Image: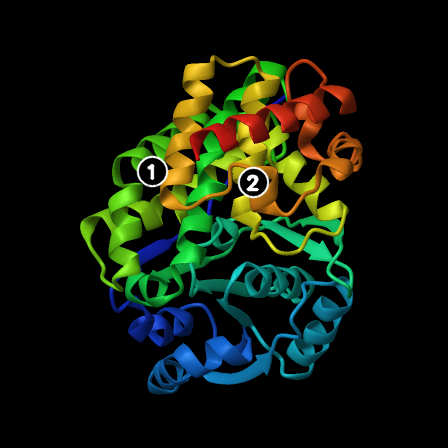
Amino acid sequence: MTRTFVAPPRYLQGVGTLDDVGTHVSRLGGRALVVTDEVVADVVGESVTRSLSDAGVDYRVVTFGGECTRDEISRLTDVAQNGAVDVVVGVGGGKVVDVAKGVRSRIGGRLVTLPTIASTDAPTSGLSVVYTDDGSLAGGIVHDERPDLVLVDTAVVAAAPVRWFVSGIGDALATRFEARATRESGGWTFAGGSPSQAGVALAERCYDVLRAHGPAAVDAVRDGTVTDDVEETVEAIVLLSGLGFENGGLAAAHAVHDGIVSVGVTGPTHGEMVCFGLLTQLVLEGRSDEEIRDVARFASDIGLPVTLADIGVSPDRLGAVAEATCRDETSIDNQPGDPTPDAVTDALRTVDELGRSLE
């Protein structure tokens, strides 16, 4: 397959970048639809709208319905079209950002993503993960374009609950290993081809940054402070992981996430489930006990789940999780060795045993 590489044209990160959002949006268009939720609006909404007003941007704020569904994308698309919007601004977590991507893909124009938590790499990607009204996973929409601007205010993300930050590390931790698996299997990426050297290199760098700076960054975020470790880790979670997964590929770690979601588990975050999926992937690959234990210990020490109990999956549901993990709709096809449901079941049990041994 052809090697491809995709990326947002501009990424801005730092303390106080939120204050300049109006200036940046005004360079992209004059009529903005700001998509956010009530909680985020209470925290940063006034700062966003004031900045837009100061920059002379005509805007409308619309409240996200709570779930990224196709119906919600359609509803907000109607609002945008009625307002002749030329810039969509998604302010909030991953689901808000994914809905904003969906709206922009339907109306055209420009897109700005402004994450208020560093919990996933959604802000940089061209993928919207969609759900049903009851929260069940319903697949994904791969858009032709990436956000025109990703703007991350590290003071905002550091002020959010630390669990979201830790979850972002869990999501990003898998990027290196999934890119490696995709390359070894000759698999595909969301960029539309085989993994590029650049994508794999960014995935590797993402992992190195997380291991070097992640623990100290978690401590700083727990205290509500922004340090160099926080800046480095935020960039790894949002930018390096985003570019790494789109251009390097997803494999078993995200497939296991999909399998867990499919059986109705709703308590863990996306990154927490991906982290457990990563450990499962390493077992499937036959990695050494030393390597798997090293990753598991790192994850456990910063508060990520390493046992079935941690992610709310009972032993009697492992078969269902494994079957769903191996469906055609997941990224399991990028995993070398064509894992079977039985192999995934055994790997899930192995991870649980290893995780309990760390306690």
Q: Which residue is mark 1?
A: 210
Location of the C terminus (image quadrant): top left
* Relative horizontal placement of residue 141, taking residue 251 as reference (left or right): right
Identify the element where label 1 is drawn: helix
Query: Which residue does the image show at 47% across and 73% down from the upper left?
Result: 29
Closer to the camera, 237 or 317?
317
Q: Position of residue 236 (x, y in %)?
A: 36, 43
State how many labels appear: 2
Judge whether residue 330 can be spotted in this image: yes
Does 226 appear above or below 167? below
| CB under 8 Å between discs 2 and 1 | no
Q: Position of residue 92 (x, y in %)?
A: 49, 67
Does 60 appear above or below 295? below
Identify the element where label 2 is drawn: helix
Closer to the camera, 140 or 323?
323
* Relative horizontal placement of residue 170, taking residue 251 as reference (left or right): left
- Find residue 337 and report its image quarter: top right
- Mark 1, other Cα within 10 Å: few <14 / some 14–19 / many ≥20: many
Three-letter amino acid code at disc 2? Val
Query: Which residue does the image show at 60% across and 43% down from the upper left?
Result: 309
Q: Position of residue 157 (x, y in %)?
A: 36, 62
Q: Which residue is mark 2?
A: 274
Location of the N terminus (image quadrant): top right
Of label 2 and label 1, which has the lower sequence position?
Answer: 1
* Relative horizontal placement of residue 222, taking residue 340 as reference (left or right): left
